[in-house]
Image (spheres, coloured by chain):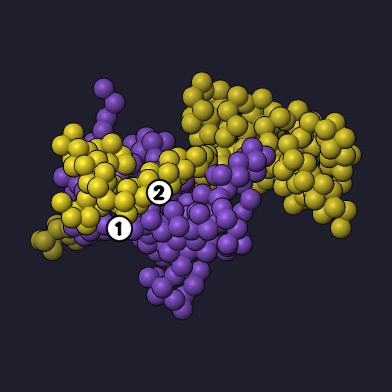
Chain colours: A yellow, B purple
Amino acid sequence: MTCEKIQEKYADYLTGDLDEAGRAEVQAHILGCQACREDLENLTVVWAKLGVLPEEQPGGAVRARFYALLEDEKRKAAAAAVPQARSRLADWLTFRRPAFAASFSVLLLLLGLGAGWFLSAGRPGRESYAALSREVQDMRQQVALSLLNDPSASERIQGVGYTAEVKDPSDTTLAALFKAVDADPNPNVRLAAVDALYLFRDRPGVRQNLVRSLSVQSYPLVQVALIDFLVEVREARAVEALKKLIEAGELTPDVKKRAEQGLRQIAL
Amino acid sequence: MAPTDNELMEDVRDGRVEKLAVLFERYQTMLYNFFLRLTGNRAASEDLVQEVFIRILKYRSGYLSESRFNVWLFQIARNAHIDYLRKQKPALPLDEKHAETPGREPLPEAAYEADREAELVRRALDRLPVNKREILVLFRFQNLKLREIAELTGVQVGTVKAQVHRALKDLSRVYLELQRGDLS
């Protein structure tokens, strides 16, 4: 068998997918062909070395963004379903016979006048819209709080995603996010919570809580996310906390470097 | 029994978009590492993962029941990566682009593990042209079969075998050069 034919078998040989007969052919060939033997040895070494590359985990923000996308898509689908129902109604109301159409128009006119009178006597529309909007916000927060207590990490991340969509979260919701940053067993949930809190960085207590959180975190990526957050908002109270962290000497070299850099950036 | 990828994607196509969450949980890490090994950039890789799921939702109606989900998914991922490269270097056609991923971010976990060997392999991989790097990443890390890569890239299986061989040979050469210090 030619060298070229043997080389075609290398990919399957390396993954272990080559059958017994194929392996025998490769081994018989390399016994008599030094170039192919060296070639295959090198490939086997580099194939094994590729295995040392560690698999990394994406940041929690990826999950939060995905679930926000999904929620958006669900809303769009729900909104699209309404016009469909409307168009069915419109089909039903489209009369071909003019006499029918005219009498129905009168009926619609009367209904319109009645509705106008009713609305002008009742609450103004803007208020009712505001009430509805508040209701939706409250509902989101309730769903978020319930998801944040779920045993599944992906549900909790989804809960964090919901809080990010609340315009003005309640103190209870913020407290649930602080708790997630401090104590959630899954680092991805903690990271997502830090990201979500960035949206509410100007709410009282958010920055202080994250400064405090710096002293209880031990997972390097969450520590870096907190430092990034506090540097971004130029939080002066973080200076003391960062100095203590560095002095405690328990940081990994990368986090320590980021903390030192952060100190310099806050001072700028 | 857990639903297959194909069953889930059929559900998504047929309007039950919430099922995409299961596919996201199955594939987000794999996709992230696919992009990370191609771009060397964590933020860009996270954006690209999101882009893939945006495109899945956009093109879901075109998903065919007889498709292999992972091949369809990586087709979308490759396209997203190609568009990313175009935005990076609009003047160069894709096949002239050599990897040399500029400014690969230091990877904190790998760094404090001080894994010099992993770093050398990563640098060697970075120096391969993007098409060779991609074929190795698909074959070695994404566990795609040769016939799946052939389907994905639109070539014969024999061609993929030859491409894998050449890419590994190049990687081996660059790795040895880096190890000897011939390349900075």
Report the quarter where the N terminus of chain B lies.
Answer: top left
Q: Give the spatial CA distance, label 2 vs label 1.
A: 16 Å
Where residue A101 sits: x, y (%)?
17, 59
For the residue labelled by badge 1, is the local secondary structure a helix, a strand or a loop? Answer: helix
Q: Is residue B81 visible?
A: no
Provide the chain ID for the residue under circle 1. Answer: B
Q: Which mark is residue A42?
A: 2
Mark 1 neighbour density, 10 Å: few (under 14) some (14–19) many (20 or more): some
Q: In which quarter of the view is residue A17 placed?
A: top left
Question: What residue sits 53% from the left and 58% below the top?
Answer: B177
User: Residue A152, image x and y in percent?
Assistant: 49, 24
| Residue A16 percent location from the top left of the image | 28, 36
The answer to whether residue A34 is visible is yes
Is B141 situated above or below A249? below
Q: Nearer the viewer, residue B71 or B128?
A: B128
Extreme-bottom residue of the structure: B91
Residue A55 as seen in the image, left or right of residue A224: left
* Residue drawn at (42%, 62%) of the image: B130
What's the residue at 53%, 62% (across, down)? B101
- Identify residue for label 1: B163
Q: Is residue A82 left or right of residue A208?
A: left
Figure check: A263 above or below B156: above
State the SS at label 2. Answer: helix
Q: Chain of mark 2?
A: A
Q: Amino acid at mark 2?
A: Asn
